[in-house]
């Protein structure tokens, strides 16, 4: 098959980790007789440096024209980078939010799995980590606080800032449907996370999720308040299968979920619209502190590329091969710094890519 992939390497460790994921994709293409064509485009800080804005119309058009988008990470150090002296709508993150909206990527899938080889890197007590966990956070990505009206103004001589959390029933329904569809292919349990004891948007969320659940009698639905969910994630993560939640709650809970897997450098993510089109990126950030040092963990990006093969290109066998190669490398005790532990072999970002490629 021939596929056109828009590639956003981005800022910080982005270029290093994406280069490794492309190495893996090239190997897959060679082995399975596919042709992957890459269209490299700029977004984030590198686009600000080049064009004075984080996302150009040209980048949007080229991403839309592609079969899928592979991304690294964007942004820099928010206290020292000059990008953060710019007005908020011209900063790197504004580019990412606009791209999500322009591409209609309302469903963000963030799987959090504790690899048995890495259970030692899990910060939880052994009696909890020993049970393992395998959950998928389905985060709503184009609504809520991130996209509601916002302003900062002086009200009666006092500076006042407002952000708006708004959801309509259609936005809730389509993400709920995605969550139940995915749950049907997993362990058939959905935990819907909200703050229905306080927020109107959460009460509507709960009502719509319950309506959608009627079409999925095989799936068990439970509701959980977001504060309790944060607690349950560290108390008993094994209880979760699919967790569906609004944008901001999902942002926070997915970082927490990634941390208990041992390292944010292991977590892949897919952002999808109603079709098979998606943007694939690691859940972690641009890690400016280690950028350019060939130290970053490329596994999350490589696993994101595997999600691209599976969800956008229907290449299940190829996706399995990539995931198995990652597993094999972990079995052999090969580690980047973030997941290093005693007795293991420490490798660089590019060595990790080479070794995973060699298993394919
Ligand atoms: C994420 C990131 C982004 C978000 C930032 C970079 C805007 O934290 O993808 O989780 O908040 O969505
Ligand atoms: Mg985040």
Image (cartoon, rainbow, N blue to C red):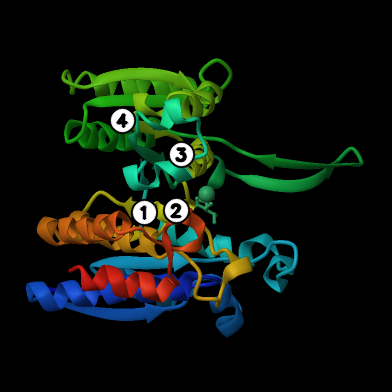
Q: Is label 1 in contact with label 2 (beta carbons under 8 Å)?
A: yes
Label 4 packing within 10 angstroms: few (<14), some (14-19), many (20+): many
Q: Is label 2 in contact with label 3 (beta carbons under 8 Å)?
A: no
Q: Residue at x 27, y 65 (%)?
A: 68
Q: Nearer the viewer, residue 286 or 321?
A: 321
Q: Residue at x 50, y 62 (%)?
A: 337
Q: Nearer the viewer, residue 267 or 276?
A: 267
- Residues at marks 3 and 4, CA–CA distance in whole angstroms: 12 Å
Query: In the rendered structure, which disc, 1 or 4, sits on the residue that comes first in sequence?
Result: 4
**SS for tag 1?**
loop
Label 1 packing within 10 angstroms: few (<14), some (14-19), many (20+): many
Q: Look at the numbered disc 2 and say if its residue's Cβ is closer than 8 Å to ligand 1.
A: yes
21 relative position to 88: left or right = left
Residue 257's disc is 3
Percent of width and height locating residue 170: 34, 34
Label 3 packing within 10 angstroms: few (<14), some (14-19), many (20+): many
Quarter of the rendering containing residue 354: bottom left
Query: What residue is shown with label 1?
Result: 268
Residue 38's disc is none
Query: In the rendered structure, which disc, 1 or 2, sits on the residue that comes first in sequence?
Result: 1
Query: What residue is shown with label 2?
Result: 283
Query: In the rendered structure, which disc, 3 or 4, sits on the residue that comes first in sequence?
Result: 4
165 relative position to 122: left or right = right
Q: Please indicate, yes or no, whether residue 160 appears anywhere in the rendered image.
A: yes
**SS for tag 4?**
loop
Query: In the rendered structure, which disc, 2 or 4, sits on the residue that comes first in sequence?
Result: 4
Q: Residue at x 16, y 60 (%)?
A: 321
Percent of width and height locating residue 144: 51, 39
80 relative position to 141: left or right = right
Residue projecting furthest to the front: 343
């Amino acid at each position: 098959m021939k596929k056109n992939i828009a590639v956003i390497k981005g800022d910080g460790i982005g270029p290093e980790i994406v280069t490794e994921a492309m190495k893996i994709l090239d190997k897959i293409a060679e082995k399975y007789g596919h042709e992957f064509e890459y269209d490299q485009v700029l977004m984030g800080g590198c686009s600000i440096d080049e064009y004075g804005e984080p996302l150009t119309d040209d980048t949007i058009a080229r991403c839309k024209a592609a079969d899928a988008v592979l991304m690294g990470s964007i942004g820099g150090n928010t206290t020292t980078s000059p990008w953060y002296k710019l007005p908020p709508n011209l900063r790197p993150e504004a580019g990412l939010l606009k791209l999500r909206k322009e591409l209609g990527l309302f469903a963000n899938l963030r799987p959090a799995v504790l690899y048995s080889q890495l259970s030692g890197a899990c910060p939880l007590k052994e009696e909890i980590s020993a049970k393992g966990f395998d959950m998928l956070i389905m985060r709503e990505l184009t609504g809520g606080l991130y996209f509601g009206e916002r302003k900062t103004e002086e009200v009666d001589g006092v500076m006042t800032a407002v952000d708006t959390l708004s959801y309509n029933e259609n936005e809730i329904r389509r993400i709920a449907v995605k969550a139940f569809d995915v749950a049907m292919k997993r362990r058939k349990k959905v935990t819907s996370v909200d703050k229905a004891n306080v927020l109107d948007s959460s009460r509507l969320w709960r009502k719509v999720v319950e309506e959608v659940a009627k079409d999925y009698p095989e799936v068990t639905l439970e509701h959980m308040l977001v504060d309790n969910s944060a607690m349950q994630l560290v108390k008993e993560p094994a209880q979760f299968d699919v967790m569906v939640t609004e944008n901001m709650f999902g942002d926070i809970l997915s970082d927490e979920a990634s941390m208990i897997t041992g390292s944010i450098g292991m977590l892949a993510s897919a952002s999808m619209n109603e079709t098979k089109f998606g943007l694939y990126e690691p859940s972690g950030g641009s890690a400016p502190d280690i950028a350019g040092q060939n130290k970053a963990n490329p596994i999350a990006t490589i696993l994101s590329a595997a999600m691209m093969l599976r969800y956008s290109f229907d290449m299940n066998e190829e996706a399995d091969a990539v995931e198995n190669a990652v597993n094999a490398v972990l079995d052999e005790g090969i580690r980047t710094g973030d997941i290093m532990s005693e007795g293991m072999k420490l490798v660089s970002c590019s060595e990790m890519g080479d070794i995973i490629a060699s298993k394919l």
